[in-house]
Image: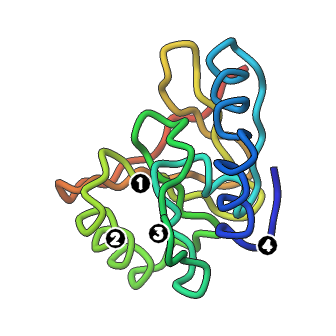
Amino acid sequence: MTNSSGTGLSQPLPRSGGTSVIARHVSRGGLLCGGSAGAIVCGATILTAPPEEHSTRSNEGLNLLGGASILAHYEDTPVARAGAFRLAAELRTPALWALPENSGIRLDASGEPRALGERACLQFTAGGRMSDIPSDTV
């Protein structure tokens, strides 16, 4: 799934029944690949997108990542880290997965994230912890 707008992607899904179709597909082991807004909408909330992308109706994502949310296009700088910690605390999310360009994650069989791509992916928690998401060894 790709889209330039998180709300543009997430708003039609519930109305069309797409949310349940996607959730059923994923629960049966189906592959789902989301880039940019498509990745963000797979998380618990789309509030990780830029404010102009937020909705007046609902900012809920598809919640296909065990309660985690996605911070797409992440550049690891001190300012970005501070923002990610602040956002994780504000959202009270179990995990905020920060994905740089040309990188991503996949969930292993136990539902744990594994990093893919050229650059390290990071996990921020509401408790103020940051860690590298382990690299995929497939």
Q: Position of residue 38 (x, y in %)?
A: 72, 55
Tell me which amino acid carries mark 4.
Answer: Ser
The picture quadrant where one finds residue 90 is: bottom left
Q: Earlier in the sequence, mark 3 or mark 1?
A: 3
Question: Mark 4 = which residue?
Answer: 4
Instruction: Left or right? Give the position of 120 relative to 96.
Output: right
- Label 3 to label 4: alpha-carbon separation: 15 Å
Question: Mark 1 = which residue?
Answer: 96
- Label 2 to label 4: alpha-carbon separation: 21 Å
Q: Residue at x 59, y 87 (%)?
A: 52
Q: Tell which tag, 4 or 1, sits nearer the viewer.
A: 4
Q: Position of residue 131 (x, y in %)?
A: 37, 48
The picture quadrant where one finds residue 54 is: bottom right
- Label 4 to label 1: alpha-carbon separation: 20 Å
Q: Residue at x 23, y 56 (%)?
A: 126
Q: Position of residue 83 (x, y in %)?
A: 37, 78
Q: Are marks 3 and 1 in contact (CB under 8 Å)?
A: no
Q: Are marks 3 and 4 in contact (CB under 8 Å)?
A: no
Mark 4 element type: loop
Question: Mark 3 = which residue?
Answer: 47
Instruction: Decide: few, some or many residues near mark 2? Use Cα within 10 Å; few <14, some 14-19, many ≥20.
Output: some
Q: Residue at x 54, y 52 (%)?
A: 61
Q: Position of residue 76 (x, y in %)?
A: 51, 71
Tell me which amino acid carries mark 1.
Answer: Leu
